[in-house]
Amino acid sequence: MKYLVLLVCVFSFQQVVGSIKDTLGNPLPDIKVENITQHYVMFSEAKGVFYITARKYDTLQFSSIFFEEKKIVVTRKMLKQPLTIILKDKLNELEAVEVTDS
């Protein structure tokens, strides 16, 4: 009975595979991919490809200082086919500065 429980736990985890791109379709390397539910972290490869262990209903977070953060909840479909994640540029607005001649 102990082995049956272990087997069920092992097979419930799968790899979510995909690629991360910007809004122009360019691959994004070095994007932090985190399974928030299971506390796994990895970074996308040079061509924006990522692999991370997950289960159905886990939450994945994609983040970078240059792009808006994105969170998704893993579905059964996501465990069976590659994903394409699109990240939008992050706009960092600065407050206005007044320059005076002294």
Image (cartoon, helix red, strand yellow):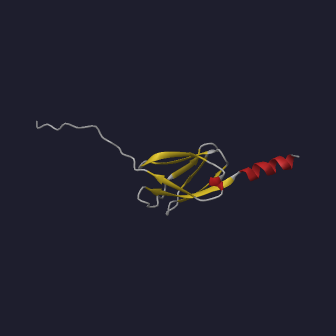
**In the rendered image, which quarter is residue 18 located in?**
bottom right
Picture coordinates of residue 91, whole percent (x, y): 36, 45
The residue lying at 14 percent from left, 37 percent from top is 100
- Foreground: 78 or 5? 78
Residue at the right extreme of this rendering: 1
- Foreground: 102 or 34? 34
Picture coordinates of residue 95, whole percent (x, y): 28, 37
Residue at the front extreme of this rendering: 77
The residue lying at 48 percent from left, 54 percent from top is 86
The residue lying at 79 percent from left, 49 percent from top is 8
Picture coordinates of residue 89, whole percent (x, y): 40, 50
Picture coordinates of residue 69, whole percent (x, y): 47, 45
Left/right placement of residue 54 relative to residue 101 reads right
Q: Is residue 97 above or below residue 35?
A: above
The residue lying at 24 percent from left, 37 percent from top is 96
Total labels: the figure holds 0
Residue at the left extreme of this rendering: 102
Q: Is residue 66 above or below residue 26?
A: above
Left/right placement of residue 78 relative to residue 8 reads left
Quarter of the figure that contains the C terminus = top left
